[in-house]
Image (cartoon, rainbow, N blue to C red):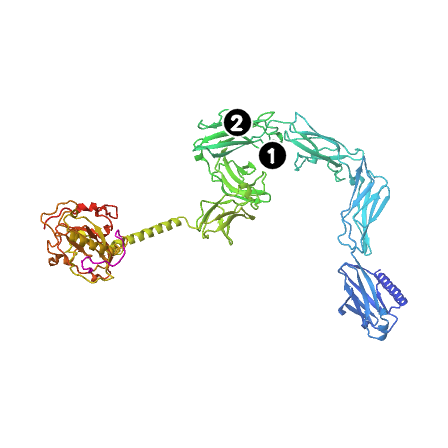
């Protein structure tokens, strides 16, 4: 048999060669490739042969192969003979390609007939057909009957090419009726339409896959016609509630197809309204061929949704129909069968040593109806509870049914005030329209007797929930735990069993909201101390930044700033740190911990405007707050006061130093600013006669001083001789010729440092003193002045004169210079010379030597600057406005020598 097959293959190859050779000869080509237009199996090797025909110009050594314009290496060639060359290539890609045979001999004939020395074939590739798997067929119900269309499908081939697709042929045979139905397609599904649905008849169905590389069949399905049926869902489904059965609902429906064709079985499922967690009734609990069923063990006063479907009752036959439409109804109310969930929040009271307790209560889990009120009773160890009640008190519930059913919102029962050293126990029951629930209780111990909290509480995120873990307290009397969480959306809690050490919060937890989570151990109904933590389900960037402001006044180089913490509902995460930015052209920044809300900026520039802002950061990002501007002071606080104090102290120091210098150098200052003038009353003057100068000297211009004349009456002029009057008049004229000036400026006798004449008869000048000399004159008279009684003995009228700056002159003690007594006893004068201050001579050695006369027992010394020339003696005034007569009492009476 094998030998016969090989012979056939060789014959086919020879025929193909002869056919291709004849075709090439007709076309004039000298090269022929065999096989022609092959279909290659993917993953195999393909061998082609190029044969030279009709010429001897080329041999197999002159041939080479080209695949998709790429020369195939020589190691893939096989030389069959001098006129045939084969090549072997792998088939490893699905794209279409051309394989060419070329001649590269360099001859004139080959060059001129180049088109005859090339030949190519088109390579098509494909996969061997795969066996169809998982053949399924279905006949659906249309109206009251089963459709005549059989819809069959199978798994598509894993490998195929677009150029060489696999063709599928579906075969359906009704065995008892000898009818066959065939449909071909290139898809993985097909529909066969038969004359009528074969109820209670056996069918055989299979699929054949084939292409140019082979043919394969699927498994054959041999089943009764009902095995392929899928009916419609039951119709006219309804659900009924019955007052006497608060825990059940009755379902009714109609069969979708007459039972003469099919006997059906059913499946029922139900859930609370709005939930997608379905509960199914076991199929074994549902009898075949029924049209009603009672759902039991439901919760009273709850809305339920139910569905039903059906299929062929024969085991393993047919398909389940689709689920029927939802039907909904509510179970009747019943007495609450579980306790209400009682809890409390404890805060510090307004007074000391007391607690403010707020009591909350959730509806019982199995409230079995709308809770209309709660009954509350509070028992205290010491009966001093404010707002408490020792008897049952009814508290109505105003929440709507929509609020209470799905979310179990809590009710605030009471707020009581409990002292720290008092304990209380609260009892609560819930009431609906049918009855009252079992009693729930909660104990509030004394503050000092609160039992131990849980240990090592830890909170972390697990998906969209918060996972809590803790270790139980050392006390083994824990009966349960209460997990409480407080956020911006309110308070909630849940209870866990005594063996629980980790749980997830089952309430609504929002992202970016901070929750204060507490875990309370419950000791036989008495609450223990809580363990607390703060947590976020997910953190985000703060919605706003801190608001910064100055605290007090700025300094010269520093400023204290404070800022408010971001409101809890605006943080969206834990604040990790604050960054302080300040700018005055150049920007600086300082990072401080999240617990700091004030800071003192230092090393600032004086009298400079700064802009500051605060950045708040979380693990997810940062947000800047609003800017605030301030200007630093030009001077530091107290600096101006220190400057004033320093300047004041310096001024005081200078004043003190000046005063000390004035005290220490008072003589020098007095000498420079207030020249010392000798007091003539404290000096003794020599007597001299105007007619007989003691020591005439030649006048010196530099030492002359002006003389002014003072009028004075001596003894009313009665005792003065006429000769003396003439002499005095002559002297007066001499004196007045010098413009009545003395040598000191600003005196009452006119100040002009002019030269004065002598008062002697010969006109000889008595030299005046230097610029620093003060001249004085005195009058010595034998008669009393202004009516005063003189001495009995007649006295000679004398002139006395002093030109010395010293209180006493040496010449004043020389008696031999005195004028003899009584030489001028008869002389009387109507005028007396008044000597003014003259400039003191800078040269003290030039002071004139004056003959000192013996003084009279009574004498008057008159400063020259007290005089005013040209006026009567009685009319003369002093600088301070005093009359000259005020000096008269100083003269006193003359006494005899």
Residue 512: image location, x then y, percent: 57, 43
Mark 1 closeness class: few <14, some 14–19, many ≥20 residues within 10 Å = few
Between 223 and 124, the one lying in front of the other is 124
In magenta stretch: residue 748: yes
Mark 2 closeness class: few <14, some 14–19, many ≥20 residues within 10 Å = many
Q: Is 699 positioned to the left or the right of 620 in the image?
A: left
Image disc number at residue 407: 1
Q: Is 693 positioned to the left or the right of 413 in the image?
A: left
At 84% across and 75% down in the image, what residue appears?
107
Residue 535 lies, with reference to residue 703, above or below; the image says: above
Inspect this view and state whether residue 91 appears.
Answer: yes
Inspect this view and state whether residue 682 appears.
Answer: no
Work out whether mark 2 precedes mark 1 in sequence or the reverse, and give the earlier one.
Answer: 2
Instruction: Count every numbered label the image shows and give the total.
Output: 2
Q: Dot 1 lies on which element?
A: helix
Q: Is 336 positioned to the left or the right of 753 in the image?
A: right
Residue 151: image location, x then y, percent: 80, 43
Between 502 and 665, the one lying in front of the other is 665
Q: Dot 2 lies on which element?
A: strand
Q: Which residues are magenta?
A: 747-765
Q: Which residue is mark 2?
A: 376
Quadrant of the rendered structure where residue 247 is? top right
Residue 3: image location, x then y, percent: 84, 62
Q: Is 221 positioned to the left or the right of 893 in the image?
A: right
Quadrant of the rendered structure where residue 403 is? top right
In magenta stretch: residue 675: no
Residue 293: image location, x then y, percent: 71, 30
């Amino acid at each position: 048999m094998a030998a016969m097959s090989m012979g056939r293959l060789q014959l086919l190859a020879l025929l193909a060669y002869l056919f291709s050779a004849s075709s090439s000869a007709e076309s004039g080509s000298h090269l022929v490739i065999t096989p022609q237009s092959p279909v290659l199996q993917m993953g195999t090797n393909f061998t082609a042969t190029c044969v030279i025909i009709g010429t001897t110009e080329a041999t197999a050594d002159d041939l080479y192969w080209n695949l998709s314009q790429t020369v195939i290496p020589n190691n893939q060639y096989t030389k069959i003979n001098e006129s045939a060359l084969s090549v072997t290539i792998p088939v490893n890609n699905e794209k279409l390609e051309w394989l060419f045979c070329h001649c590269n001999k360099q001859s004139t004939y080959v060059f001129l007939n180049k088109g005859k020395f090339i030949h190519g074939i088109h390579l098509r590739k494909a996969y061997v057909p795969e066996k169809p798997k998982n053949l399924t067929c279905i006949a659906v119900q249309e109206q009251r009957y089963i459709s005549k269309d059989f819809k069959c499908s199978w798994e598509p081939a894993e490998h195929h090419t677009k150029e060489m697709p696999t063709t599928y042929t579906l075969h359906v045979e009704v065995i008892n009726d000898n009818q066959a139905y065939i449909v071909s397609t290139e898809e993985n599904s097909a529909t066969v339409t038969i004359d009528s649905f074969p109820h209670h008849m056996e069918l055989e169905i299979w699929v054949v896959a084939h292409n140019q590389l082979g043919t394969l069949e699927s498994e054959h399905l041999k089943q009764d016609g009902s095995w392929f049926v899928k009916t419609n869902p039951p119709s006219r489904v309804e659900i009924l509630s019955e007052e006497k059965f608060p825990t059940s609902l009755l379902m009714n429906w109609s069969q979708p197809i007459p039972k003469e064709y099919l006997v059906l079985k059913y499946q029922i499922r139900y859930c609370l309204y709005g939930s997608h967690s379905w509960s199914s009734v076991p199929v074994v609990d549902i009898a075949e061929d029924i049209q009603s069923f009672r759902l039991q063990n439901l919760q009273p006063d709850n809305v339920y949704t139910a569905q039903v479907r059906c299929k062929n009752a024969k085991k393993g036959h047919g398909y389940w129909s689709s689920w029927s439409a939802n039907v909904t109804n509510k179970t009747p109310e019943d007495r609450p069968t579980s306790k209400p969930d009682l809890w409390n929040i404890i805060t510090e009271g307004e007074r000391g040593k007391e607690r403010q307790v707020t009591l909350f209560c959730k509806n019982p889990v199995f409230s079995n109806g709308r809770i209309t009120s709660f009954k509350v009773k509070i028992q205290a160890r010491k009966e001093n509870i404010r707002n408490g009640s020792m008897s049952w008190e009814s508290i109505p519930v105003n929440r709507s049914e929509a609020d209470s059913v799905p979310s179990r919102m809590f009710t605030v029962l009471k707020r009581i005030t409990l002292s720290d050293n008092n304990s209380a126990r609260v009892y609560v029951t819930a009431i609906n329209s049918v009855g009252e629930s079992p009693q729930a209780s909660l104990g509030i111990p004394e503050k000092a007797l609160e039992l131990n909290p849980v240990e090592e509480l830890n909170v972390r995120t697990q998906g969209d929930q918060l996972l809590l873990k803790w270790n139980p307290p050392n006390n083994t009397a824990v009966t349960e735990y209460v997990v409480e969480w407080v956020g911006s959306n309110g308070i909630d809690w849940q209870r866990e069993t005594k063996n629980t050490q980790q749980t997830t919060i089952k309430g609504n937890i929002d992202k970016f909201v901070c929750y204060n989570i507490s875990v309370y151990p419950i000791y036989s109904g008495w609450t223990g101390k809580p363990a607390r933590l703060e947590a976020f389900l997910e953190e985000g960037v703060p919605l706003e930044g801190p608001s910064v402001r100055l605290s007090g006044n700025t300094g010269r180089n520093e400023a204290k700033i404070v800022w408010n913490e971001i409101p809890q509902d605006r943080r969206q995460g834990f604040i990790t740190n604050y960054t302080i930015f300040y700018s005055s052209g150049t920007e600086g920044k300082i990072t401080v911990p999240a617990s700091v809300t004030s800071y003192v900026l230092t090393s600032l520039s004086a009298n400079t405007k700064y802009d500051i802002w605060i950045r708040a950061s979380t693990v997810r990002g940062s947000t800047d707050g609003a800017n605030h501007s301030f200007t630093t002071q030009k001077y530091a606080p107290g600096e101006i006061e220190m400057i004033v104090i320093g300047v004041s102290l310096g001024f005081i120091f200078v004043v003190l130093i000046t005063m000390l210098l004035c005290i220490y150098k008072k003589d020098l200052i007095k000498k420079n600013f207030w020249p010392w003038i000798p007091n003539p009353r404290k000096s003794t003057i020599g007597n001299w006669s105007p007619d007989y100068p003691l020591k005439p000297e030649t006048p010196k211009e530099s030492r002359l001083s002006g003389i002014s004349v003072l009028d004075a009456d001596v003894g009313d002029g009665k005792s003065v001789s006429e000769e003396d009057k003439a002499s005095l008049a002559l002297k007066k004229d001499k004196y007045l010729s010098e413009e009545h000036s003395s040598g000191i400026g600003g005196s009452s006798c006119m100040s002009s440092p002019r030269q004065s004449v002598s008062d002697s008869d010969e006109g000889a000048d008595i030299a005046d003193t230097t610029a620093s000399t003060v001249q004085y004159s005195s009058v010595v008279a034998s008669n009393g002045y202004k009516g005063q009684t003189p001495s009995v003995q007649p006295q000679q009228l004398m002139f006395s004169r002093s030109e010395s700056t010293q209180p006493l002159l040496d010449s004043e003690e020389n008696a031999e210079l005195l004028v003899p007594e009584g030489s001028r006893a008869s002389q009387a004068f109507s005028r007396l010379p008044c000597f003014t201050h003259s400039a003191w001579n800078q040269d003290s050695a030039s002071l004139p030597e004056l003959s000192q006369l013996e003084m009279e027992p009574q004498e008057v010394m008159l400063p020259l600057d007290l005089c005013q020339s040209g006026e009567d003696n009685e009319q003369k005034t002093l600088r301070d406005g005093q009359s000259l007569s005020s000096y008269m009492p100083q003269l006193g009476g003359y006494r005899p020598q």
